[in-house]
Amino acid sequence: MDTQEIRTLKLLEELEGEKTPSQRDLAIRLNISLGLVNSFMKRLAQKGYFKVTNIPKNRVRYILTPKGTAEKTRLTYEYIQMSFRYYKNARLKLRTLFRQFEEQKIDRIAFFGAGELTEIAYISLQETNIKLVAIADSDKIGDNLLGLRILAPEELRSLNFQKVVVTETNATGNAMNQLIEQGIRRSQVEFVYIYRNMVL
């Protein structure tokens, strides 16, 4: 499943709701440009996935056709399959990594990044005697995740841990730079590479 199919699925899900979102609303919700939303909408309409009707106040309403509903169902199934493969692959890689940590007598770690991979890493960690001492993420400082307050990267300096596992799935180079700026050695940082669209 590629990025275009995921965007198509998200657009079809948004259009299925009772409220009619504007293209500007869709751009904000999907975090893509208004021009890209417009292009996608034209393409999906040409494929017959929805009909456009006018409603008062110069607005339009999008109504999914049976063809659009069938496509949304197909893409949803593919997305679930892809997510399951991602989860299974992540669990396998994390189990292996944490087993290596235990063999090396590493028993205190931190996560850098607060997202879905962080949650999968936490689940995997419960099968070990390793303690999670902190989660840091420069974009989510102060939020709570897994019972911990998310820290700023600089707060890691004062903590006692042996490894930082980067659970941020985007911009791994940026993560390394941020950690090195905090005085964390490269040898203390572990990356987990998980590819969403394939089984490794």
Image (cartoon, rainbow, N blue to C red):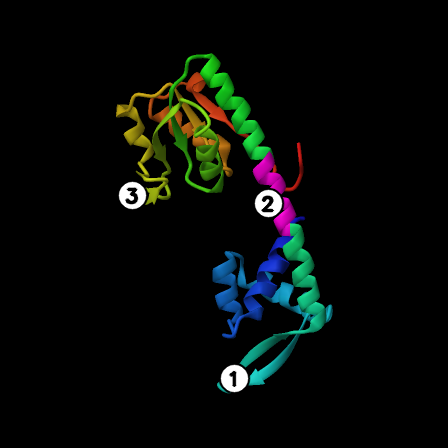
User: Which segment did they paint magenta?
Assistant: 79-88
Using the image, determine if residue 140 lies above or below residue 13: above
Determine the residue positioned at 51% across, 71% down: 21
Q: From the viewer's perspective, is the residue at label 1 or at label 2 nearer?
A: 2
Q: Main secondary structure of the magenta part?
A: helix
Give the distance between the C-alpha atoms of the residues marked 1 and 3, in whole angstroms: 42 Å
Q: Image check: 131 left or right of 174?
A: left
Seen as rendered, the residue at the extreme bottom is 56
Image spot of residue 190 (x, y percent): 48, 24
**Which label belongs to residue 83?**
2
Q: Is residue 62 left or right of residue 66?
A: left
Residue 189, magenta (yes or no): no
Query: In the rendered structure, which disc, 2 or 3, sits on the residue that comes first in sequence?
Result: 2
Depth check, mark 1 against mark 3: the one in front is 3
The answer to whether residue 194 shows anywhere in this view is no
> Which residue in the structure is indicated by mark 1?
58
Q: Is 152 positioned to the left or the right of 14 in the image?
A: left
196 lies above or below 12: above
**Residue 146 drawn at (x, y percent):** 37, 40
Q: CA distance from mark 2 to mark 3?
A: 28 Å
What type is the residue that disc 1 sits on?
Asn
Residue identified by numbered label 3? 142
Tell me whether circle 1 and circle 3 mark residues in contact (CB < 8 Å).
no
Element assignment for label 1 = loop
User: In the image, what residue occupies the spot 45% across and 39% down?
Assistant: 119
Task: Give the amino acid at mark 2.
Answer: Ser
Q: Earlier in the sequence, mark 1 or mark 3?
A: 1
Secondary structure of residue under mark 3: loop
